[in-house]
Image: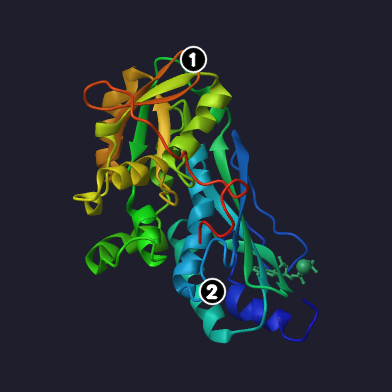
């Protein structure tokens, strides 16, 4: 963006003093040291107006969520955040929006130790487009890679599933209005909490991990493909958010198995680590639930309480196979 005001905008909303030993916003590049014995973990996620968020989305929540979904990728790799960059494309300079967005963004950046150290700002001819890159560090050879799961591993899920999916359906009017359920589930959709502490401590304990952004079955199947194994998942063991109680069973299953935006970690670990993982979860106050096991073969079998195979309608969300506008 070459128009007057670009640099004012950056210094007003995005420039913060860089932490010690780092060079932040204001030069051609940011600089930061890496701890000895660690490697860099890098991830980028985009958020596009009309596709990932609605035009009237609360800007402060959006600032939080835009960073949270990126931090969730660091968590799923077992990495500790170092810093982030923000590329922002805006149709116009809207000070109320920028103030809200930047305050949500910086609050989570502070809380998670992930300062904003650079970015780019341009004008958009369509809606708001955001692209965030997070940089983290992970002890060399300790990262939670998707290709490192092994037959015999337990499958675990953090937190609960289904709330964000339910909130999205209610928000979009795809379910009959239910203000109480909406109130109970909206925080999961608007303010996901990246599982950074858990991910960090799992590095060196768990074998493989993903974060659940597009649906449990879909994201977990990336581990299975990369690691060349199959899995049994136990439907009754899946940790359902309390707001799913009393829902129609087909809807409940779909929210649990295929609901997006959960930002929980799904990870695999050898059975010898069961107790340690439970202790870790209680110390961090993050529920951890054992939901299945890895087997020889390919793909996921979802089993009900009687050991029967549960038919699966939809794996999860895919931008290029879903009907246009299927997801906000
Ligand atoms: P360049 O011309 O080298 O691309 P810019 O003029 O785009 O630099 O940006 C000036 C400085 O402001 C750089 O340090 C850049 O990283 C930073 N910056 C630009 N936009 C943002 C933003 N949205 N958030 C944080 N930093 C930004
Ligand atoms: Mg630039």
Residue 46 lies, with reference to residue 289, above or below; the image says below
Seen from the viewer's position, the closer of residues 195 and 150 is 150
Task: Evaluate whether residue 160 shows in this view.
Answer: no
Q: Disc 2 and disc 1: Cα gap in Å?
A: 44 Å
Residue ID at (35%, 47%): 255
User: What label sits on residue 203 in the rendered view?
Assistant: none
Give the quarter of the image for residue 234.
top left
Q: Secondary structure at mark 1?
A: loop
Quarter occupied by the N terminus: bottom right
Of callouts 2 and 1, the N-terminal one: 2
Residue 202 lies, with reference to residue 71, above or below; the image says above
Give the quarter of the image for residue 288.
top left
Q: Position of residue 275 (x, y in %)?
A: 26, 26
- Would you name the residue on which mark 2 appears? 55
Question: Is the residue marked 1 within 8 Å of ligand 1, measured from its CB?
Answer: no
Q: Residues within 10 Å of mark 1 (few under 14, many from 20)?
A: few
Seen from the viewer's position, the closer of residues 4 and 177 is 177
Residue that extends furthest to the left in the rendered view of this protein: 246
Q: Classify residue 14 as left or right of residue 305.
A: right
- Would you name the residue on which mark 1 appears? 297
Q: Position of residue 192 (x, y in %)?
A: 40, 56
Residue ID at (52%, 59%): 67
Q: Position of residue 162 (x, y in %)?
A: 34, 49
């Amino acid at each position: 963006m070459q128009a007057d005001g670009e640099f004012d905008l950056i210094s007003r909303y995005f420039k913060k003093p860089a932490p010690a030993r780092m060079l932040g916003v204001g030069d051609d590049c940011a600089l930061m040291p890496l701890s000895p014995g660690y490697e860099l973990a890098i991830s980028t996620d985009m958020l596009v107006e009309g596709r990932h968020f609605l035009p009237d989305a609360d800007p402060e929540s959006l600032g939080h969520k835009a960073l949270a979904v990126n931090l969730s990728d660091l968590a799923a790799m077992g990495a500790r955040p170092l810093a982030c960059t923000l590329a922002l494309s805006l149709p116009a300079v809207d000070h109320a929006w920028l103030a809200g967005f930047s305050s949500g963004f910086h609050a989570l950046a502070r809380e998670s130790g992930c300062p904003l150290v650079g970015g780019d700002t341009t004008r958009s001819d369509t809606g708001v487009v955001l692209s965030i890159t997070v940089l983290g560090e992970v002890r060399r050879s300790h990262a939670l890679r998707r290709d490192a799961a092994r037959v015999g591993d337990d499958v675990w899920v953090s937190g609960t599933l289904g709330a964000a999916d339910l909130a999205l359906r209610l928000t979009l009017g795809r379910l009959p209005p239910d203000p109480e359920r909406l109130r109970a589930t909206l925080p999961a959709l608007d303010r996901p909490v990246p599982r950074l502490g858990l991910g960090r401590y799992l590095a060196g304990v768990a074998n493989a991990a993903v974060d659940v952004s597009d649906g449990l079955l879909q994201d977990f199947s990336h581990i299975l493909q990369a690691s060349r194994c199959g899995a049994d998942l136990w439907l009754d063991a899946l940790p359902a958010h309390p707001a799913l109680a009393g829902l129609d069973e087909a809807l409940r299953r779909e929210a649990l198995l295929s609901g997006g935006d959960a930002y929980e970690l799904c990870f695999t670990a050898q059975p010898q680590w069961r107790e340690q993982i439970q202790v870790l979860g209680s110390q961090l106050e993050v529920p951890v639930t054992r939901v299945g096991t890895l087997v020889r073969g390919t793909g996921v079998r979802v089993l009900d309480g009687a050991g029967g195979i549960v038919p699966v309608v939809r794996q999860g969300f895919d931008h290029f196979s879903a009907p246009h506008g299927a997801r906000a």
